[in-house]
């Protein structure tokens, strides 16, 4: 679970917004292109917590949901390892 200490905000920004974000069903091609571009240029540094084969997708998704993986999970297809 994520915890948030509101008192840590006293020395930081003047305003903070916490908002739920749900991406299902939205077109995401342009957003993915932007993210890839930022990574390529070294402006975004994603944390990869697990790299595994597609055959472990179900287990990996459970581990992501249960927060047993820190960062992103990468699922490889075919013989890519």
Image: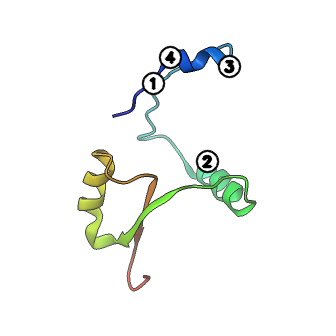
Q: Of 19 and 68, which appears nearest the observer?
A: 68
Q: Earlier in the sequence, mark 1 or mark 3?
A: 1
Quadrant for the N terminus in the image:
top left
Of callouts 3 and 4, the N-terminal one: 4
Q: Residue furthest bottom?
A: 79
How far across and how far down the image is residue 56, in percent?
A: 27, 68
Sequence-wise, which precedes: disc 2 or disc 4?
A: 4
Question: Please, which residue is most extreme toward the right here?
Answer: 41
Report the quarter where the C terminus lies: bottom left
Q: Which residue is tagged 4?
A: 6
Cα separation between marks 4 and 1 = 6 Å
For the residues labelled 2 and 1, say whether their Cβ atoms are less than 8 Å apart. Answer: no
Kindly check if marks 3 and 4 are in contact, taking CB atoms under 8 A apart as contact: no
Which SS class for mark 1? loop
* Residue lying at 42% horizontally and 41% vertically, measured from the top left: 25
Which numbered disc covers residue 13? 3
Q: Which residue is mark 1?
A: 4
Label 1 vs label 3: CA separation? Answer: 15 Å
User: In the rendered image, which residue does mark 2 sit on?
Assistant: 31
Cβ atoms at labels 4 and 1 below 8 Å apart: yes
């Amino acid at each position: 679970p994520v915890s948030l200490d509101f008192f840590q905000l006293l020395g930081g920004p003047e305003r903070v917004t916490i908002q739920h974000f749900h991406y299902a069903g939205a077109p995401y091609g342009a957003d993915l292109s932007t993210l890839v571009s930022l990574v390529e240029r070294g402006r975004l540094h994603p944390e990869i917590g697990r790299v595994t084969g597609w055959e472990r997708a179900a287990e990996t998704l459970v581990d992501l949901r249960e927060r047993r993986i820190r960062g992103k999970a990468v699922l490889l297809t075919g013989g890519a390892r």
